Image (cartoon, helix red, strand yellow):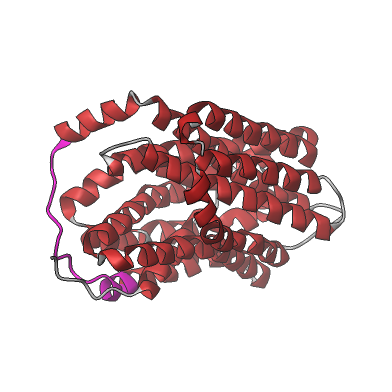
């Protein structure tokens, strides 16, 4: 029996939070950036889309790098390298330069995502693996909210560039937490077999169930990013006219993901991903309908309900990924993340264009179609997983 590492949940939760601070942090700044750069809703959405596009493109290769160099080394290196694009963003005075810095961030983020998951699978005692992984996933959800809040408060206090100075400091903290909280690997074996990886990837691309699950993932994050990118623009306009700080606080609904995921896990395990996806689609549609109403409390309630549906759908899709394959899990996860974050990149532009065209109603309609599409694809592809 392998010797157990002394691993604690808190550092992995903090690593997840610090990492995902980078992904969506500028979302609460989009109205300010649109005014600053004099661009449309579709154009300013690229501040988010540039990062998620890079994450999508690099996700399939991140596992190969972590397998070759080591999970701890890759995590430390990625957090250290994230300091550079954060610094570049603090000096950005055009949309193009900001997007370049954001794209560079997106290339580094998947390295930590893949490395931490693989590290826990190899180094954690089996009895503690689920708890440690849950701590990391919960941390990513908290980080998604905290980044939006941090940026909103920073802009409210002075200048939007301050948000990226704070991200620089949090990435520096990430280096320290990874250094102290991730002991050196005891069970890592370098793997440098690109031909074998290519063979596995070809097999995955011939797996209809996996490809359909990737399509579901594309549509899931498409909805989430469409909603939260454009709702900031709606809240900054009449009749609400909210500043970046209050908008950042409204992203607290994102924290529901930290509750929904573990609460629904037993039902997902018992009844299967198709049941969970059906429930998720109905929940999200109900929430999107609520967002069509004008009163702010009902709008926030609608955002919360829609987000719950998306998080439930994501849990279902991740379960379906694992049930659709028998091996090559790192590459399968990389392929799923490629399409998942690809959905975010498309949403960043398309949802902005819809908002410019017909306002929030067009965005809500677009998201309803996408959620129904996710349900239809899952119904077709996950029939054998139904309870």
Q: Is residue 34 left or right of residue 178?
A: right
* Residue 93 in the image, given as x and y percentages of width and height: 54, 53
* Residue 318 in the image, given as x and y percentages of width and height: 44, 45
Residue 117 sits in which quadrant? bottom left
* Residue nearer the viewer, 319 or 186: 319
- Point 48% across, 67% down: residue: 165
Report whether residue 77 is seen.
Answer: no
* Residue nearer the viewer, 71 or 309: 309
Residue 330 sits in which quadrant? top left
Considering the whole magenta stretch, tell me its main secondary structure: loop
- Point 59% across, 28% down: residue: 376
Q: Is residue 12 magenta?
A: no
Q: Which residues are magenta?
A: 176-194
- Point 26% across, 59% down: residue: 119
Instruction: Indicate whether 138 appears above or below 344.
Output: below
Q: Is residue 301 left or right of residue 151?
A: right
Which quadrant does the N terminus fall into?
bottom left
Instruction: Indicate whether 162 appears above or below 371.
Output: below
Total count of labels: 0
Instruction: Indicate whether 224 appears above or below 262.
Output: above
* Residue 222 in the image, given as x and y percentages of width and height: 58, 39
* Residue 12 in the image, given as x and y percentages of width and height: 37, 68
Q: Is residue 105 left or right of residue 163?
A: left
Q: Is residue 155 left or right of residue 238?
A: left
Report whether residue 339 is seen.
Answer: yes
* Residue nearer the viewer, 225 or 4: 4
């Amino acid at each position: 029996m392998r010797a157990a590492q002394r691993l604690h949940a808190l550092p992995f939760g903090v690593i997840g939070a610090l990492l995902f601070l980078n992904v969506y942090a500028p979302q609460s700044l989009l109205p300010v950036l649109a005014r600053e750069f004099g661009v449309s809703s579709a154009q300013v959405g690229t501040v988010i889309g540039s990062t998620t596009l890079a994450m999508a493109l690099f996700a399939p290769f991140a596992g190969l790098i972590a397998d070759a160099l080591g999970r701890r080394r890759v995590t430390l290196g990625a957090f250290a390298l994230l300091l550079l694009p954060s610094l570049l963003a603090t000096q950005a005075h055009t949309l193009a330069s900001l997007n370049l810095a954001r794209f560079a961030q997106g290339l580094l983020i998947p390295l930590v995502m893949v490395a931490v998951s693989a590290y826990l699978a190899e180094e954690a005692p089996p009895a503690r693996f689920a708890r440690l992984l849950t701590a990391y996933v919960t941390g990513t959800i908290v980080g998604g909210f905290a980044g939006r809040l941090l940026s909103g408060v920073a802009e409210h206090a002075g200048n939007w560039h301050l948000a990226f100075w704070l991200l620089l400091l949090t990435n520096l903290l990430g280096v320290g937490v990874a250094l102290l909280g991730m002991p050196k690997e005891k069970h890592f074996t370098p793997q440098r077999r690109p031909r074998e990886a290519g063979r596995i990837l070809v097999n995955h691309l011939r797996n209809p169930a996996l490809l359909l699950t990737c399509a579901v993932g594309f549509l899931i994050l498409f909805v989430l990013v469409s909603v939260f990118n454009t709702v900031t623009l709606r809240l900054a306009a009449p009749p609400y006219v909210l500043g970046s700080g209050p908008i950042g606080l409204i992203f607290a609904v994102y924290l529901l993901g930290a509750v929904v995921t573990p609460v629904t896990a037993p039902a997902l395990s018992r009844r299967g991903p198709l049941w969970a996806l059906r429930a998720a689609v109905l929940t999200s549609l109900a929430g999107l309908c609520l967002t069509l109403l004008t009163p702010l409390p009902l709008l926030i309630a609608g955002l919360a309900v829609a987000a719950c549906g998306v998080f439930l759908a994501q849990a279902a899709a991740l379960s379906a990924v694992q049930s659709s394959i028998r091996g090559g899990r790192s590459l399968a996860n990389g392929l799923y993340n490629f399409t998942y974050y690809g959905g975010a990149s498309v949403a960043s532009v398309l949802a902005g264009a819809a908002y410019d065209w017909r306002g929030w109603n067009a965005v809500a309609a677009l998201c309803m179609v996408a959620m129904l599409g996710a349900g239809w694809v899952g119904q077709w592809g996950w029939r054998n997983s139904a309870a």
